[in-house]
Image: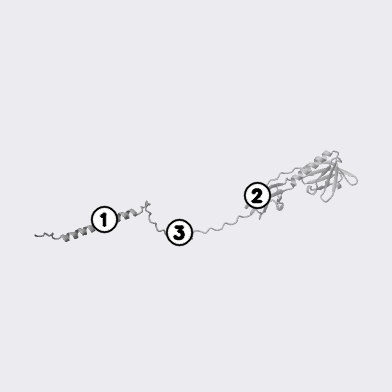
Amino acid sequence: MRTLTVPGDGDGGRRTLGVALLLAVAVAAAVLVVWLLWRRPPEGPKGPPQAPRALTSPPATPSPSPTSEARAMSSPRSEPRPAPASPLLQVDADVPGANVFLDRRFLGTTPVEAGGVAPGPHRLNVSAEGYEMYGETVELRPGRNEVTVRFKEVRLDERIDVVHRHGVGSCRGRLVATTAGLRYEADKAGDSFEAPLASLEPLQVDYLKKNLRVKQRGGKTWNFSSDSADTLLVFQRNVEKAREKVSS
């Protein structure tokens, strides 16, 4: 009896085994890839792409051009401003030789100039015999300050017939008052006298005794009487009113 044998049976088994191993490795690799993908954490949303920062450098200082340097050298330097000049007061009047006082300080007679006065308000008084006293507050500023005074004439012409009583006896005459002063014109020339108003104290009237008292400052005293006390009172008031205008 003859036995049949299949040639190459051993080689076929080896091929089958190799294919099976390759398939197993492929399956294992696939499983590993799937497992790794499943374990990877989810990625968050990506923000907008950031632009790369530009490198900053300090601004370049422009070098002065020759033209600007020439202008700077040619332009004159500003000089400091001079200090303002102090006030200069100039006073004139329509009456020459009027007395000028600034803050009660005698400056002279018109026309007059005074320098070295502080800026600001000052009291100015100008007087002339026979005219009303001029007075005002002036605001002096640096530089020239001009003031022109126009006087108002004071009118005084009072006359009254009186009896001048002496220590012993009396004499009759006329008492005359003007802006120049007080004058007594007596019947006897030796009893006459005159005195400037500025040299006399205020006149006083004793109404009941009908007496007018005239006293020189630091000097003599004269007493005059009249038939009417009212006449003496009017005379006294007019003289004092005029004197107030002249000296105020």
Task: Check the image and name the residue furthest to the right.
Answer: 168
Label placed on residue 68: 3
Q: Are marks 2 and 1 in contact (CB under 8 Å)?
A: no
Q: Nearer the viewer, residue 245 or 8?
A: 8
User: Residue 71: x percent and y percent?
Assistant: 47, 59
Figure quadrant of the N terminus = bottom left
Neighbour class for label 2 at 10 Å: few (<14), some, many (≥20)?
A: few
Q: Which residue is mark 2?
A: 139
The one nearer the camera, 57 or 36, is 36
* Residue ID at (48%, 59%): 72
Q: Looking at the image, is mark 2 or mark 1 earlier in the sequence?
A: 1
Q: CA distance from mark 2 to mark 1?
A: 117 Å
Q: Position of residue 154 (x, y in %)?
A: 74, 43
**Amino acid of disc 1:** Val
What residue did someone put label 1 on? 27
Q: SS class of the residue under badge 1?
A: helix
Q: Which mark is residue 105?
A: none
User: Could you tell me which secondary element the residue under label 2 belongs to?
Assistant: strand
Specify the amino acid type for callout 3.
Answer: Ser
Q: Position of residue 203 (x, y in %)?
A: 81, 45
- Where does residue 215 sit, x and y in percent of width and height? 83, 47
Mark 2 / mark 3, whichever is N-terminal = 3
Q: SS class of the residue under badge 3?
A: helix
